[in-house]
Amino acid sequence: MEFKEVNQLPIDVEKAIKKRVSTRSFEEKALTDEDKNKLMDFNRTLTNPFGIDVHVQHISKNTGEKNVRLGTYGTIKGARDFLAITVKDEAFAMEAVGYQFENLVLYATHMNLGTVWLAATFSRKDFENAMDIESDELFPCICPIGYPSERRSIVEKFTRASLGSKNRKPWEKLFYLEDFNKPMSKYDAGNYEKALEMLRLAPSATNSQPWAVVKEKNKFHFFCNYKNSINNDMKKIKHLDLGIALSHFHQTAMSNGLRGRFEIQDIHFQVPEHMHYVISYITEK
C-alpha cells in the first residue's frame, strides 16, 4: 500500500492537544454561520495518510426538520450542532477516520470550540434519519460541537471522574525500545520525545489508550492493543483510537520540523498475543 503525504496543520498543534478536553456540557445555542463555515471549509482541506475518503456531515437541531431527533442518551447537554463521520468499509478505514477527524477536532479546539468523540452513546437511527449515508458506508462516530458551558452537568462530572480522563498511562507502559521487553526512555526517543508525549495525551474510548509503540533504530512501529476475543465493532473503535494517536504523533513531528514516511514493515521481534501490528513510521535522517 502506498501511503499519502498530508498537510501540516496551520495551528500550534501542541497547544491545541494540551487544551483539548472532552466537552459534554454546551451553551444552548447553535454555531454562528461564521464559525460553521470556517470549520467546514477547513474540513474540506483535510486528508489522511491512507488515502481514504472520510466524509464529515454537519447536522443541526435548528434545521426545523420534522420528526428528527438527535439522541445522546443524556450524556450530552445543550449541544445544537453535531458532526457525523462516515467512511467506506475497507482496510485502514478506522485509522483514516481517527487521523483525519482528530485533525479537525484540534482545529476546532484552536477556534475555542468544544468537542467530544462519541462512538456508542448516541442513537444511530436518529442521526441516520438526518444525514446522507450509503449502504456500504460505516458510521463509526459523531461529535457534538459548540461553545463549552462554564457549568458542567452532573453527568459530565460523573463521566470525567469515572473515566479518569486526566490520567494517562506512563511512558514505560506504552513505548518500547527494539522489542516489547525493554521500555523506551525519553532519552531513547530522541527528537521524537515530544511527538510521543503528544501521542500519550490522545483521547480514546474509556481512556483505554489501546496503543503501543516500539522504536527499532530509525523506525517507530505502531501496535493496537486488544484481546482477540472482543467483537468486530470494538476492534474498529480500537483502530479508530490508534488513528487519533497517529494524528497527534505525526502532526507534532511535522510541527517540530521532523520528516518521515509511513510504511508497512515486517516485524522480526516477538509480539505479545494482544498486540496487533498496524503501521510503521520511518524517520528521515
Image: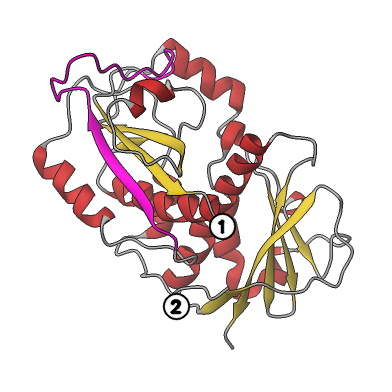
Relative to 173, is 25 on the left or the right?
left
Depth order, front residue of 194/81: 81
- Farthest residue in the front direction? 135
Of badges 1 and 2, the one in the foreground is: 1
Q: Nearer the viewer, residue 174 or 47?
A: 47
Q: Secondary structure at mark 2?
A: loop
Magenta stretch bounds: 52-76
State whether the magenta stretch is mostly helix, strand or loop: loop
- Residue type at mark 1: give it: Phe
Q: In the figure, is residue 211 to the left or right of 68?
A: right
Q: Quadrant of residue 163?
A: top right
Which image quarter is the C terminus in? bottom right
Please tell me which residue is depicted at 31% across the width and 52% down the height of the picture: 107
Q: Which mark is residue 204?
A: none
Residue at 53 percent of width and 20 percent of height = 159
Residue where numbered disc 2 is placed: 257
Q: Position of residue 205 (x, y in %)?
A: 58, 35
Residue 29, percent from left and from top = 17, 23
Q: Which residue is mark 1?
A: 92
